[in-house]
């Protein structure tokens, strides 16, 4: 059975710790170990900070949606403004989105949400090394 949880925050850095705590609490209700929960907290913080640093739509919100499955947690982090969601490796490393590199390294699945690139969807599976 799937469960859904959502959170909406202002697009401001002082709320990122709230998202980390919420993500930790959601993951803690599942069978994730300490390292997996830490990976999830890092990934959501990187995604939120990347959206905030993008600077577009400063008056907008960030929406975080959690989908709890039997053996996975999928998290969607999105905003109403376009963000930099570069999945491919850039020719010039200085143009590479460092947050996306980190998220792809520690999460099991990562993808940009829709063609407008207004968010990221990431999945962590229980007991699977990224």
Image (cartoon, grey):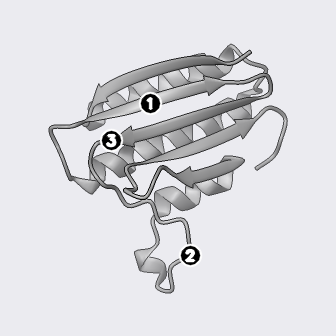
Q: Please say if the residues under marks 1 and 2 sit with CB atoms less than 8 Å apart.
A: no
| Residue 62 x/y as whole percent | 33, 35
The residue positioned 50% from the left and 79% from the top of the image is 90
Q: Is mark 3 on a helix, strand or loop?
A: strand
Mark 3 crowdedness (10 Å alpha carbons): few <14, some 14-19, many ≥20: many
Instruction: Please give left or right for residue 105 compared with residue 119 in the image.
Output: right
Q: In which quarter of the image is the N terminus?
A: top right
| Residue 36 x/y as whole percent | 71, 34
Report how many numbered discs are placed on residues in the image: 3
What separation in Å lies between label 1 and label 2 (alpha carbons)?
26 Å
Q: Please say if the residues under marks 3 and 1 sit with CB atoms less than 8 Å apart.
A: no
| Residue 66 x/y as whole percent | 55, 26
**Which residue corresponds to mark 1?**
64
Instruction: Please give left or right for residue 92 compared with residue 69 in the image.
Output: left
Q: Which of 24 and 88 is in front in this view?
A: 88
Mark 1 crowdedness (10 Å alpha carbons): few <14, some 14-19, many ≥20: many
**Which residue corresponds to mark 2?**
89
Q: Which residue lies furthest to the bottom in this view?
A: 91
Q: Which of 9 and 14 is in front in this view?
A: 9
Q: Is residue 102 above or below residue 121?
A: below
Instruction: Please give left or right for residue 41 compared with residue 84 in the image.
Output: right
What separation in Å lies between label 2 and label 3 (alpha carbons)?
23 Å
> Which quadrant of the figure has residue 28?
top right
**Which residue corresponds to mark 3?**
79
């Amino acid at each position: 059975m799937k469960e859904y949880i959502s959170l909406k925050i202002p697009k401001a850095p002082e709320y990122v710790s709230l998202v980390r705590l919420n993500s930790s609490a959601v993951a803690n209700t599942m069978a994730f170990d300490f390292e997996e929960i830490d990976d999830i907290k890092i990934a959501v913080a990187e995604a939120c900070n990347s959206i905030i640093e993008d600077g577009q739509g400063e008056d907008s919100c960030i929406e975080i949606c959690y989908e709890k499955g039997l053996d996975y947690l999928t998290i969607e982090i999105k905003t109403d403004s376009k963000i930099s969601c570069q999945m491919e490796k850039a020719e010039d490393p200085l143009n590479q989105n460092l947050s996306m590199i980190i998220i792809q390294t520690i999460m099991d699945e990562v993808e940009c949400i829709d063609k407008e690139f207004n968010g990221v969807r990431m999945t962590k599976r229980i007991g699977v090394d990224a």
